[in-house]
Amino acid sequence: MIHEIQKHFEKEYPREGCGILAIVKGKKEWFPCTNVAEGNEEFVISSEDWFSIKKKADIFAIVHNHLDNDNTASTNDINYCNALGIPYYIFSYPDMDLNVLEPKENFNPLVGREYEFGVQDCFEAMRDWLASENIIIDKRASFEQNWWEKDLDYFTEDVIAQWGFKKVDTPMKNDLLIFAIESDKGNHCGVYLGNDIFFHHAENRLSCRESLYPFWGQHILGIYRHEP
């Protein structure tokens, strides 16, 4: 398997290579993935690859390489590893020395978080608020930035149903709110708290409680209630 991973890294060079280790029928398998990051020394796994693999296997670890024989976990590696809840296998390249980074559960206050996409964003704020109410959503997928502009949709009714939520017409406390801002696809989420107040985390802002009106309420795409 290491040889297959190395061959993929050779093919991708001078860009970082990436892929997924997953469990298929009780055995670990390697799935090379497309790196859709803008820069050569960073990686973002293609959402198409992620969901394709997740449909047929249990994702075990994220694999990528650092160039120039460095396998030290970066700040982004640590943050995304913790957010996804999945180990990161970081190889130096071309030496192929392995560093395994394990996720850690870190307490982070709900209100007043600084925004960082994929680490502290609307999904994490929504998921953590609901967890504080004993409503558990599985760890997130690896989102691509501006996914709604790339014909991707992480908030389909099928996906939300897998989290244990059913669409309703009128919001109640702890209902999941999906918003579509200047798009026909869901691209923001929050939690309804009652009295037209919701909790969310918007880009370039701190996480907060906020009124749905006059702005946010007009962009609600769907309301979803957890069914134990």
Image (cartoon, rainbow, N blue to C red):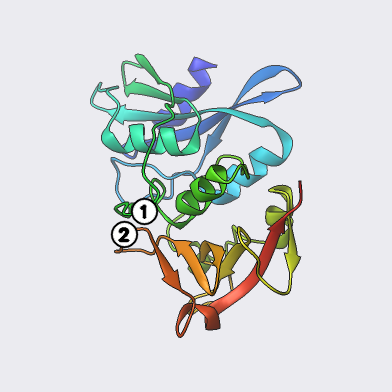
- Residue at label 1? 111
Circle nearer the viewer, 2 or 1: 1
Q: What residue is at 55 percent from the left and 73 percent from the top?
A: 195
- Drawn side of residue 209 relative to residue 41, left or right: right
Residue for point 59% across, 66% down: 177
**Which circle marks residue 206 in the picture?**
2
Amino acid on which the number 2 mark rests in the picture: Leu
User: Residue 189 at what x, y percent from top left?
Assistant: 52, 63
How many labels sit on residues?
Answer: 2
At label 2, counting other C-alpha atoms closer than 10 Å, the crowd grade (few under 14, some 14-19, many 20 or more) is some
Q: Is residue 118 above or below residue 192?
A: above
Quarter holding the N terminus is top right
- Whether tag 2 and tag 1 are in contact, CB under 8 A, the answer is yes
Establish if 161 lies above or below 96.
Answer: below
Of 67 and 190, the residue lying toward us? 190
Residue at the image position 39 percent from the left and 35 percent from the top? 107
Q: Earlier in the sequence, mark 2 or mark 1?
A: 1
Q: x, y percentage for residue 57? A: 69, 32
Give the SS element for disc 2. Answer: loop
Q: Viewer-proximal residue, 118 or 178?
A: 178
Neighbour class for label 1 at 10 Å: few (<14), some, many (≥20)? some
Q: Position of residue 131 (x, y in %)?
A: 55, 43
